[in-house]
Amino acid sequence: MISESALRGYVLEEVLARLLRENGYSLLVRESQDRAALRDSARGLLVRGRGADHQADALGELQIPTPFSLPVRLFAEAKFRGEAVGITAVRNAVGLLDDINAYYRDDTGDGLPLRRYHYRYVLFSTKGFTADAQRYALAHQISLIDLQGPAFEDLRAVTAGATRRLLDLAERSGVPAFPLWQARAALRHALGTWTAEDRSPDAAHGAPLSDVITIEEMSAGQPLQLPAGSLTPHRREPGRRPRRPAHAGIPSGAVRPGPPAR
């Protein structure tokens, strides 16, 4: 069975995907959304690279146009651990980006122009980052988001509560191994971030978790509370072009959340 620490990180990624969606990103969840760049697997969604395919736990595409630039896609990885994230996680992100950004296909049969994307990477941590990790991230343009502050207390509590409830559900169901991909799909349906037109692959794993998990259950009966601050969605009037969200598609080192929006 998966450890509670590891599962907390996966659940946190799904909650953060909700915040990404509210800041102009559309979550990519299935191969059918881009068959040239994505591939379904037993482990979940894979993004094609030049040397290998890479698992995408939370991948968003920025819906706000970036003039005179390739469209932006963002990998989101979250760590919910008892210690600061070190340089190894940042090195892994740099290697993944190098491989994926070097890949493109010219044999799709669609003719010209070919489609390519500019992939970026953001690491979230509930215990911050070591000094070496921050320096390496700044040098290689990996965004670091520190979730230690009081503005993210509700987010951490919702994540921890949802993790415990998922583990309890798995134990009561008597499954031999935790169905991580099934749990992710269920969370995305509960959080409203499942963006593919086709159904989730829950049926392949038995009784669908998405039939029994709700947002209220995730937070142990409490309403889902998301933190205010620089990740808060901007309101816009109908017909107006949305503003560029804070930090969206702009890599930086050791970015901390700003003050709550008024």
Image (cartoon, helix red, strand yellow):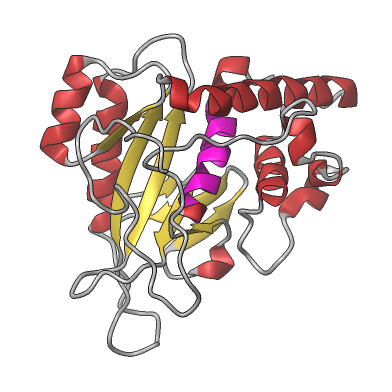
Name of the residue lying farthest toward the left = 139
Task: Give the quarter of the image for residue 242.
Answer: bottom left
- Write the residue at 61% across / 21% down: 157
Name of the residue lying farthest toward the bottom = 111
Left or right: 129, with 26 as reference point? left
Left or right: 236, with 103 as reference point? right
Q: Is residue 129 visible?
A: yes
The stretch drawn in magenta includes residue 32: no
Q: Which quarter of the rendering shows the C terminus?
A: top left
Task: Give the quarter of the image for residue 245.
Answer: bottom left
Instruction: From the viewer's side, name the closer residue of 109 and 93.
Output: 93
The stretch drawn in magenta includes residue 14: yes
Q: Is residue 50 visible?
A: no
- Write the residue at 34% across / 14% down: 84
- What secondary structure is the stretch in magenta mostly built from? helix
The residues colored magenta run: 9-21
Name of the residue lying farthest toward the front = 262
Instruction: From the viewer's side, name the closer residue of 9 and 51.
Output: 9
Task: Give the quarter of the image for residue 30.
Answer: bottom right
**Residue 184 spot, x, y in % from top left:** 65, 41
**Residue 36 spot, x, y in % from top left:** 43, 70
Instruction: From the viewer's side, name the closer residue of 187 and 98.
Output: 187
- Write the residue at 57% across / 39% down: 15
Above or below: residue 151 compared with residue 203:
above
**Residue 99 spot, x, y in % from top left:** 26, 50
- Write the residue at 22% across / 45% down: 251
